[in-house]
Image: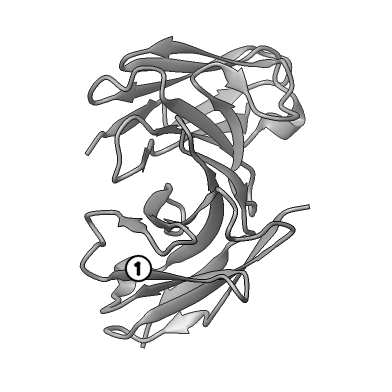
Amino acid sequence: QVQLQESGPGLVRPSGTLSLTCTVSGVSISSTFWWSWVRQPPGKGLEWIGEIYHSGSTSYNPSLKSRVTMSVDIFKNQFSLKLNSVTAADTAVYYCARVGRGGTYLFGIWGQGTMVAVSS
Amino acid sequence: EIVMTQSPATLSVSPGERVTLSCRASQSISSNLAWYQQRPGQAPRLLMFGVSTRATDIPARFSGSGSGTEFTLTISSLQSEDFAVYYCQQYNKWPPITFGQGTRLEIK
């Protein structure tokens, strides 16, 4: 079955860069789906970070756009997130998710999430 | 940006009861609304889309209604596994995709 797994450092220093990778199994990342990152600060709601297609096309949340870069590696079946100039406000559980589009925008499959703390 | 507002923030209910959760959009989103359930320590799970279409394996006790700016999710008879946080999400216009702040169902 399709599975997504986030990986990356659990602690990032303030002003540093948060880097996460999502490894996709059970389906080719070059399929017709988009791939997305969503985060959730402790005890709070969900925030969409952005999306990427296997072609490299991206769309980002305007609130984060100046600090976000997403990329895809079709050979490793992975996609990645980089968020620079992080502060404590970026502390959250980061989820990767597969997005079904075509008239909708549905997060159909999620990774288990990875907690990233921003602290010195 | 379309702002999604859910109410109430928390609902205390007993197993077996019927419960209705509300979600309001800051502008019309037609029927481009989804609901997610998030149990403690887990990732969200897609429940409903297109306001009232249940996702795969979602039981019939879940139903959705509404259009435009006002939407509801109803659980007809609460089971123990339904006590969780529920989020609505609009996909009428993006970026950004936006979620409500969530409604927590807790056991009375």
The residue depicted at 36 percent of the width and 88 percent of the height is A120
A109 left or right of B5 in image: right
Which residue is tagged 1?
A90
With respect to residue A74, does B50 lie above or below? Answer: above
Q: Name the image quarter holding residue A71.
A: bottom left
Towards the viewer: B49 or B72 = B49
Label 1 crowd (10 A; few <14 / some 14-19 / many >=20): many
Q: Locate residue B82, reporting x and y percent.
A: 68, 30
Towards the viewer: A40 or A25 = A25
With respect to residue B105, does A69 lie above or below? Answer: below
A35 left or right of A29 in image: left
Q: Name the image quarter holding residue B37.
A: top right
The residue depicted at 29 percent of the width and 34 percent of the height is B93
The residue depicted at 59 percent of the width and 61 percent of the height is A29
Q: Name the image quarter holding residue B5.
A: top left
Q: Locate residue A51, reporting x and y percent.
A: 41, 55
Residue at the right extreme, as displayed: A1
B15 left or right of B2 in image: right
Towards the viewer: A94 or B53 = B53
Q: Locate residue A12, reporting x and y percent.
A: 41, 83
B102 left or right of B30 in image: right
The residue depicted at 49 percent of the width and 63 percent of the height is A94
**Helix, strand or loop status at disc 1:** helix
Task: Write down the chain letter for disc 1.
Answer: A
Q: Amino acid at mark 1?
A: Asp
Q: Locate residue A26, reporting x and y percent.
A: 74, 58
